[in-house]
């Protein structure tokens, strides 16, 4: 018998595009409203935020084996100079983990997704 997780992408195991889009739609308002990290979205237009959400969706789809094509800049260039701290990163992860709980993301997929995200930390966090 074949282990399904070995033959199915993380993207598919997490529910595909609609699941990623639903999580994304919940995540961004939480981040924007957060008193510690909401500053990163201050003075941004609704269109700019909408584009950021779409790029995040495409990026996360691609890195989990989905069919999207990411057209954004690399993460280091995108986040350079923003002053994102280790504390900011932890606040972000707290929101993400809370949404994983809300969406009942199973442990194997949760761990795999968090490992992918953790691999981007050095490109995003300034200090």
Image (cartoon, grey):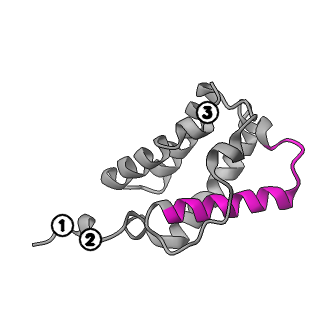
In this rendering, the answer to whether 29 lies above or below 95 is: below
Confirm whether residue 48 shows in the render: yes
Q: Which mark is residue 12?
A: none
Which secondary structure lies at badge 2?
A: helix
User: Could you tell which of marks 3 and 2 lies nearer the N-terminus?
Assistant: 2
**Residue at figure coordinates x 41%, y 55% from the top left:** 105
**Residue at figure coordinates x 79%, y 35% from the top left:** 39
Residue bearing mark 3: 125
The chief SS type of the magenta part is helix
Which secondary structure lies at badge 3?
A: loop
In this view, the residue in front, 4 or 22, is 4
In this rendering, the answer to whether 52 lies above or below 7 is: above
| The magenta stretch spans residue 43 | yes
- Please provide percent x and percent y for residue 29: 71, 50
Residue bearing mark 2: 7
Residue density around tag 3, few if under 14, some if 14–19, many if 20 or more, within 10 Å: some
Using residue 100 as the reference point, say whether residue 39 is left or right of it: right
Q: Among all residues in the image, which is located at the extreme left?
A: 1
Residue bearing mark 1: 3
Quadrant (top left/top right/bottom left/bottom right) for the C terminus: top right
């Amino acid at each position: 018998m074949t282990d399904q997780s070995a033959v199915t992408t993380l993207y598919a195991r997490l529910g595909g595009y609609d699941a990623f889009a639903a999580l994304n739609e919940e995540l961004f308002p939480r981040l924007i409203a957060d008193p510690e990290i909401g500053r990163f979205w201050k003075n941004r237009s609704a269109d700019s935020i909408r584009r950021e959400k779409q790029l995040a969706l495409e990026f996360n789809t691609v890195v989990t084996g989905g069919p999207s094509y990411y057209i954004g800049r690399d993460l280091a260039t995108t986040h350079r100079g923003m002053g994102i701290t280790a504390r900011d990163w932890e606040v972000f992860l707290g929101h993400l983990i809370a949404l994983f709980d809300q969406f009942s993301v199973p442990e194997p997929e949760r761990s795999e997704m968090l490992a992918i995200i953790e691999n981007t930390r050095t490109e995003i966090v300034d200090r």
